[in-house]
Amino acid sequence: MAEKTRWLAEEVQPCELPLRAYLGRSLPSQADVDDFVQETYLRLLKAKEKGPIRNIKGLLFAIARNAVRDFLRQKNSANIVPMTENAPVSVLFDDVGVAELICRREELALLTKAINSLPQRCREVMLLRKIEGLSQKEIAELLGIAEHTVESLAAKGVRRCADYLSAHDDRQTARGDSKP
């Protein structure tokens, strides 16, 4: 136990400030940083039990990046809920009619389907860029990919979503379901 404590104090804790800075930039809430530092340390200790670690700082940041990626992936998949599962629409709005609210719900549900139809990495980039509002640089750091790859995946995601929505609109028009 004393060896682990020494190892943590001498080898790992000097990396804590940069780790906290990275997590602060990568997580949606500063309140999550302490939890992720502890989670990262726990995963690092488990890796140490399996054998010696050559690059502690590199592994520490890789573990943190993966923990954040797992968290955001889980959070993003939880955020995409079909609108039909939400609470009933309030009809007390003066400026928006019930028909308009229903149309908005249907459009949002269709957009959710379009985003869910994207390949996994493309979907991750789209959600982080368009929903979470992260910059290309932040996404590149978070996912461990180049910035130009983020740009390419975002463009591909927008194009594929537009194609999906256009194809859906074409099918509705062909059936005579189009809106006035």
Image (cartoon, rainbow, N blue to C red):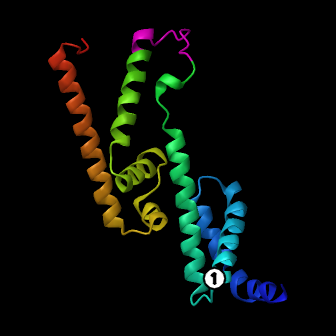
The three-letter amino acid code for the residue at tag 1 is Lys
Q: Position of residue 138 (x, y in %)?
A: 47, 62
In this picture, which residue range is highlighted in magenta?
88-100
Q: From this viewpoint, which residue is outermost toward the front? A: 50
Which residue occupies 52% across, 25% down?
Answer: 85
Q: Is residue 42 above or below residue 166?
A: below
Which residue occupies 70% across, 71% down?
Answer: 42
Q: Nearer the viewer, residue 16 or 122?
A: 122
Residue 15 part of the magenta segment:
no
Question: Could you tell me which secondary element the residue under label 1 belongs to?
Answer: helix
Residue 137 figure quarter: bottom left
Q: Nearer the viewer, residue 96 or 61?
A: 61
Q: Position of residue 123 (x, y in %)?
A: 38, 49
Q: Is residue 156 above or below residue 174?
A: below
Residue 90 part of the magenta segment:
yes
Q: Is residue 110 above or below residue 143?
A: above
Q: Residues within 10 Å of mark 1 (few under 14, many from 20)?
A: few
Residue 53 figure quarter: bottom right
Which residue occupies 61% across, 65% down?
Answer: 23
Q: Position of residue 40 (x, y in %)?
A: 65, 70
Which secondary structure class fits the magenta region best? loop
Q: From this viewpoint, which residue is outermost toward the right? A: 2
Q: Nearer the viewer, residue 20 or 11?
A: 11
Q: Which residue is mark 1?
A: 50
Residue 161 figure quarter: top left
Which residue occupies 36% across, 35% down?
Answer: 113
| Left or right of residue 40, residue 162 in this image | left
Quadrant occupied by the N terminus: bottom right
| Left or right of residue 58, residue 160 in this image | left
Q: Position of residue 139 (x, y in %)?
A: 44, 60
Q: Nearer the viewer, residue 47 or 162?
A: 47
